[in-house]
Amino acid sequence: LCSHAQFITMNLTVERVYCHEPLRRTDARFLIAETVAFCEAANPLFLSRPDWMVTATCVSAYGFCGFYVLIAVVVLTRTWASFRTPLTLFMGAKLNAILFYHVMEFTSTMPPPNIAAYFAVESPYLLSIGLVLYKILAAEVAQKQKGS
């Protein structure tokens, strides 16, 4: 739940700003200056704003946020089995987006110079996919065991 709160926060702050304009160190909005400092040290490609990254970030900011909210609701209500299909489809879309993002990052002319810092920020996205898929599968197994 904490990681999804982080994802929602990033969707509503950094990603939405990035979608519409370059991030600036002097920007006083929540998390912008910190993101710029991190990117200068560990992810310079993000600050260079290639078109594909702006598009991907806009999709994340505006398309993924609702699914992160849905996951938070499902966690709180323990209704994994009821939302199995949309959550599985979202995890597939998210995995595709993340893999594309990392391939583009590491094959670019500006790969992340600090791999440890880069993955310290990026790994919760990968971990969350595994955890959500595990919860969906566990709910389905439990539901089948109830029915037998």
Image (spheres, rainbow, N blue to C red):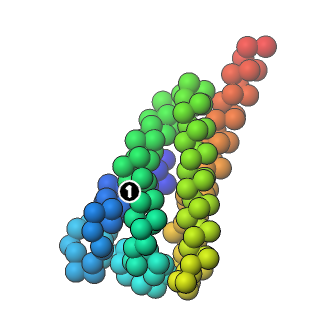
Whether residue 5 is visible to the viewer of this picture, yes or no, is no
- Name the spot of residue 113 as percent of width and height, x first: 55, 86
Q: Number of labelled discs?
A: 1
For the point 55% across and 84% down, the residue is: 109
Which residue occupies the extreme right position in the image? 148
- Name the spot of residue 143 as percent of width and height, x first: 69, 22
- Name the spot of residue 144 as percent of width and height, x first: 74, 20
Residue closer to the observer: 141 or 129: 129
- Residue 100 in which image quadrant: bottom right
Which residue occupies the extreme front position in the image? 51
> Does 56 appear above or below 21?
above
Residue closer to the observer: 91 or 110: 110
Q: Is residue 148 left or right of residue 127?
A: right
Q: Is residue 70 left or right of residue 12?
A: right
Q: Is residue 22 left or right of residue 121?
A: left
- Residue 67 in which image quadrant: top left
- Helix, strand or loop at mark 1: helix
Whether residue 54 is visible to the viewer of this picture, yes or no, is yes
Residue closer to the observer: 116 or 47: 47
Q: Is residue 73 left or right of residue 78?
A: left
For the point 30% across and 73% down, the residue is: 22
> Which residue, given by chain and number where applicable, does mark 1 sit on?
58
Which amino acid type is shown beneath numbered disc 1? Cys
